[in-house]
Amino acid sequence: MLNSFSKVDEIKKRSKIAIFRGIKRVKDDIENIMDKDPAAKSVLEIILLYPGFHALLAYRIANKLYKLKVPFIPGLISAFARFFTGIEIHPAALIGEKFFIDHGMGVVIGETTIIGDNVLIYQGVTLGGTGKEAGKRHPTIGDRVTIGAGAKVLGNITIGSDSNIGAGSVVIDDVPEHSTVVGVPGHITRQRTFVQGQLLHNKIPDPITCEIRRLTYEIRELKEKIEK
């Protein structure tokens, strides 16, 4: 009998800890949106009007149930969230702290996707696979990464921490840390366009233009050497 009471007390204790952690995570998600989105005027506005928050909250619940091996329900929650928000997040995806989906319509996050902490993505982003391969087939996103509107990050690739993916880019290869990627397919540039977690879309360098300038400079130097 004493053992039974001990088990009940332990279950209650674990439940309270889980609830506390869940509430804290929701609080952190709201504070993160307030910090990143200048349009967010109040906590109530975020809770009632932000589809990115709704989709993330639904994912947190579905992911917890998925880890507990509850059948069917996680997928059902994900499907409802997609219907109401236009954002599809597979319950099996792994998403870190302070994740923010701005606007959100058309976002797709695949089953084996791994996302680090403090990541920001915009509408129309796809973190998807490239075919019907089994196992890890979706991207791994590092910490403090920003992914612009309409970007596609495809396959079992890694986007290094503190990197930026420009709007409309298609990325199919690994990206090292502190990089900016633009274009189709994505080209890597080492120039920083990263200020306090925000991607400055209007200041992303064109890698093709940069390469042309480099070649022009080299040709000019060669001409000077030949003339001498």
Image (spheres, rainbow, N blue to C red):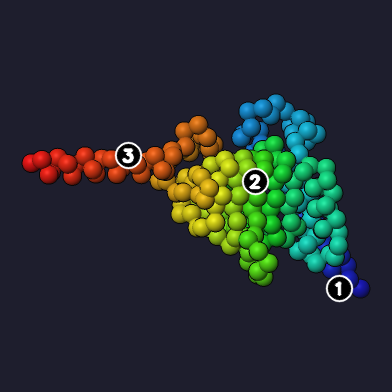
What type is the residue that disc 3 sits on? Arg
Q: Which residue is mark 1?
A: 3
In-front residue for pair 177/9: 177
**Within-10-Å neighbours for mark 1: few <14, some 14–19, many 20+:** few
Q: Which residue is mark 2?
A: 125
Q: Quadrant of residue 102?
A: top right
> Hey, what amino acid is under mark 2?
Val
Residue 64, quarter of the rendered image: bottom right
Q: Residue at x 53, y 37 (%)?
A: 199
Mark positioned earlier in the residue sequence (3 or 1): 1
Residue underneath mark 3: 213
Three-letter amino acid code of the residue under disc 1: Asn
Quote the CA–CA distance across marks 3 and 1: 76 Å
On the image, the x and y values in percent for residue 201 come to 52, 35
Nearest to the eye among marks 1 and 2: give it: 2
> Of the residues under marks 2 and 3, which one precedes in the sequence?
2
